Image: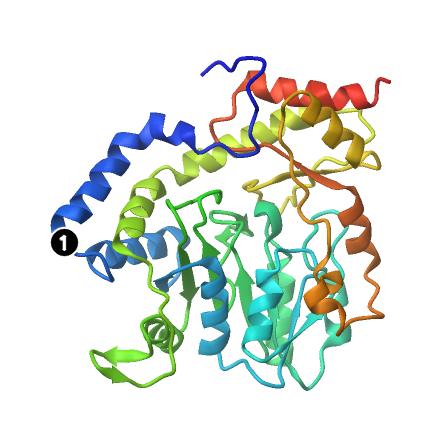
């Protein structure tokens, strides 16, 4: 599709998916409507099996959102009042929010300056007898140093919960993220690499008892109809979203490959500018849920893009330990790498259908900032 020069180039555009798989999606939805079965039926079960096979995990449980996936994983692993969970300050609020909701305390550790992920080098220094888990976020589609974090968890006998909400299909040391920890949480928010037509989430685990507990928790704590053994939630992935996700799962590798090619093209077009392009850990496969650069002239870049009707975003302008809802508990905490990155980061449009002409237009607008 050729864009008029006055069209706004969006940060993320889902409309192109209708051109590629619209008919298949409508057929999936029609089949669910025709069946009259909308809650926890054959599409949810089939999706759970198919996604478990794709991720090479033993158990997968569909839930209502990525946030719920993380919270239910914490509860199922018996993490709660008085516990501490080591995590990253450079993430969406949900990462810390769910820790607070179960009664535990987030312990923020600075990030790696290259990957923007939780720095394994700083983790052991903050482990105490209250530490119950480490929750790394595979930020922007790139795995954390999950092998080292797994080793630390085993050494201290604490849980590992992977926040995979931005990283469906990302790989580290030959394994897909989510397969390393005691549990992993995924989001199917529409802008994710595997996105639903609304909210949706998934918990994966290697532990049968954890999977069984999450199945109960997502459905009001019920083990069987009218028998409620846990204080649960209404957090069910519905049949329509599961059917849509089954269809989209067929294209995930192709679309992740497209994202990687777009990122490589950005790298070429932005070469030799005084910006920092995304680092790719050679031990993994980055699937670029976001393409995020660093620049001392971040605000000028945003202005230049806007002047050309190009959208951009800042993920994240405020680190979690500085958020108003969190800051009162960490008034003196200084995390220098995180705080530096939040001042210089800006994310550019990236989605599988982004065309070459758009990539060139975006890159050209950025280059003008440094040609003045």
Is 201 placed left or right of 119 in the picture? left
Location of residue 312 with respect to 108 vertically, above or below: above
Location of residue 160 with respect to 361 vertically, above or below: below
Q: In the rendered image, is residue 179 in sight? A: no
10 Å neighbourhood of mark 1: few (<14), some, or many (≥20)? few
The residue that appears at 35% across and 57% down in the rendered structure is 52
Instruction: Find disc 1 in the rendering and name its residue.
Output: 36
Q: Indicate the quadrant containing the N terminus: top left, top right, bottom left or bottom right.
A: top left
> In this figure, what is the number of numbered marks?
1
Q: Indicate the quadrant containing the C terminus: top left, top right, bottom left or bottom right.
A: top right
Q: In the rendered image, is residue 175 in sight? A: yes
The residue that appears at 37% across and 37% down in the rendered structure is 251
Residue 298 pos. (x, y %): 78, 36
The residue that appears at 53% across and 13% down in the rendered structure is 4
Location of residue 233 with respect to 116 vertically, above or below: below
Quadrant of residue 356 within the rendered picture: top right
Residue 254 pos. (x, y %): 42, 34
Residue 115 pos. (x, y %): 69, 48
The residue that appears at 47% across and 27% down in the rendered structure is 353
Q: Nearer the viewer, residue 21 or 37?
A: 37
Q: Nearer the viewer, residue 103 or 62?
A: 103
Q: Nearer the viewer, residue 260 or 140?
A: 140
Find numbered disc 1 in the image and state the secondary structure of the residue it sits on. Answer: loop
């Amino acid at each position: 599709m050729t864009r008029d020069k006055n069209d706004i180039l969006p940060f993320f555009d889902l409309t192109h998916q209708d051109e590629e798989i619209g008919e298949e999606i409508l057929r999936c939805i029609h089949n669910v409507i025709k069946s009259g079965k909308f809650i926890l039926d054959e599409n949810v079960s089939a999706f759970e099996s198919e996604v478990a096979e794709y991720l090479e995990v033993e158990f997968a449980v569909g839930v209502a959102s990525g946030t719920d996936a993380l919270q239910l994983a914490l509860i199922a692993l018996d993490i709660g009042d008085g516990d501490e969970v080591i995590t990253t300050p450079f993430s969406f609020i949900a990462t810390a929010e769910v820790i607070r909701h179960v009664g535990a305390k987030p312990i923020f550790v600075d990030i790696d300056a290259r990957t923007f992920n939780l720095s394994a080098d700083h983790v052991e220094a903050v482990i105490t007898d209250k530490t119950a888990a480490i929750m790394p976020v595979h930020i922007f589609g790139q795995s954390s140093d999950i092998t080292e974090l797994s080793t630390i968890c085993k050494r201290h006998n604490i849980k590992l919960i992977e926040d995979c909400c931005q990283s469906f299909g990302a790989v580290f040391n030959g394994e897909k993220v989510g397969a390393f920890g005691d549990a992993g949480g995924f989001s199917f928010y529409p802008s994710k690499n595997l996105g639903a037509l609304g909210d949706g989430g998934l918990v994966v685990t290697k532990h049968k008892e954890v999977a069984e507990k999450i199945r109960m928790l997502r459905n009001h704590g019920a083990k069987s109809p009218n028998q409620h053994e846990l204080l649960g939630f209404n957090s069910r992935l519905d049949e329509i979203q599961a059917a849509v996700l089954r269809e989209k799962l067929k294209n995930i590798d192709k679309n992740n490959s497209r994202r990687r090619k777009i990122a490589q093209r950005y790298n070429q077009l932005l070469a030799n500018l005084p910006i920092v392009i995304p680092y790719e850990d050679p031990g993994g496969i980055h699937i670029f849920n976001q393409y995020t650069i660093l620049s001392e002239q971040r605000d000028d870049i945003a202005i230049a893009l806007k002047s050309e009707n190009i959208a951009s975003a800042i993920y994240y302008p405020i680190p979690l330990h500085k958020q108003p809802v969190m800051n009162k508990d960490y008034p003196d905490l200084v995390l220098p790498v995180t705080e530096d990155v939040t001042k210089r980061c800006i994310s550019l449009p990236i989605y599988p259908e982004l065309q070459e002409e758009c990539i060139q237009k975006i890159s050209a607008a950025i280059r003008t900032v440094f040609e003045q």
